[in-house]
Amino acid sequence: MRVIAFAAAIVFFVLGILYGLGKINFLTESGAGHQHHITHLVICWVLALLALIWARFQSSPSASMR
Amino acid sequence: MTYLQALALALLQGVSELFPVSSLGHTILVPALLQWHNIDRASASFLAFVVVLHLGTALALILYYRHEWYAIARALVASVVRGRLSDDREERVGWRLVVGTIPVGILGVIFEHPVRKLFGSPAPAAIFLVINGLVMFAGEALRRRQHRAAPGAYKPIEALSYSQSLLIGVAQGFALLPGISRSGISMVAGLLFDLDHENAARFSFLLATPVIFAAGLLEVPKLFAPGTNLVLIEAILGGIAAGIAAYLSVAFLMRYFRSNDLRPFGWYCVVMGAVSFVLARKGVIS
């Protein structure tokens, strides 16, 4: 699970960068301009951070999501 | 927009964001009902004004629950540092709020603009307001039936499972539809997962705080967008008025839900929605 969590964090981080640079437009509103890409960047990085926290919880042998 | 209109919209936003009656629906329906044709809802200045109102509302919520948020933030940081979860009440509530916020954030980013384009006019907002009322009636009826079948004490927030928290967050995502209330729909979901009204309202308001605050913050660039002609005093007064209205609303609602339910709001939504729909169909409001 820890590997999956790290992989998810990396994917979200890279996706965020690509949105920020305007390289991908998937699920963005075409007319909303750069503002909407920044919103996607922020949400991707928040998800990356949460994935890292998930990975952190997996590192403890007694950890379980109660 | 006149000062009086700005003040009225600020009070409307502060109250309707927390009362289970849909702020988005009301910001579409009320200016239309009052024939405020001078307000261009798509203009950069109006959007910037709305950003300030949202920030005022979010700050009021943070202020009202400041002790709870402080305890939750401390507990969350402690659990991340420790690397494992404990049975601490604040920590359990905090992680449930995090899990519940994820679907709202994702759904909001993906669907907010298309949904507003599709349904951002009085007739759809009126229909969804009626649906919002019916959902509250249905929620209350289902909850009563559940408790007749399995009577017992209600759960505290920390006893919600992660999947239940996630589903409450998904339910809150439906509030992207103008007319569907964020607090109403998430309260109904909380009630169906065996929270009492007071805890369902508390969880709903706590869950709404980061969403409203983040949505406001992400829209801050609109304050400085080209073509924005926002009068600073108008914006500051609007933000303060929305904040005061929101603070008083949450204080009132937390007291109200100790011994009352959602049905009066359900009646209001059904009547207001039905009247607005008839007026929209007849072309009285547009």
Image (spheres, coloured by chain):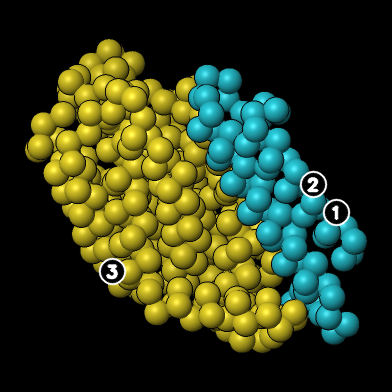
Q: Secondary structure at mark 2?
A: helix
Q: Looking at the colours in the rendered structure, which chain would you say is drawn in cyan? A: A
Q: Secondary structure at mark 1?
A: helix
For the point 62% across and 36% down, which residue is it?
Answer: A20
Q: Chain of mark 1?
A: A
The answer to whether residue A65 is above or below residue B286 is: below
Mark 2 vs mark 3: in front = 2
Q: Looking at the colours in the rendered structure, which chain would you say is drawn in yellow? A: B
* Mark 1 crowd level (few <14, some 14–19, many ≥20, 10 Å Cα): some
The answer to whether residue B6 is above or below residue B95 is: above
Q: For this view, does A10 lie left or right of residue B82?
A: right
Instruction: Give the spatial CA distance, label 1 vs label 3.
Output: 44 Å
Image coordinates of residue B43 in percent, x first then y, are 31, 23
Amino acid found under the numbered disc labelled 2: Val
Where the C terminus of chain B falls, by quadrant? top left
Image coordinates of residue B54 in percent, x first then y, are 34, 48
Q: Circle 1 is placed at which residue position?
A: A7
Instruction: Give the spatial CA distance, label 1 vs label 2.
Output: 6 Å
Image coordinates of residue B108 in percent, x first then y, are 55, 41
Amino acid found under the numbered disc labelled 3: Ala
Q: Circle 2 is placed at which residue position?
A: A11
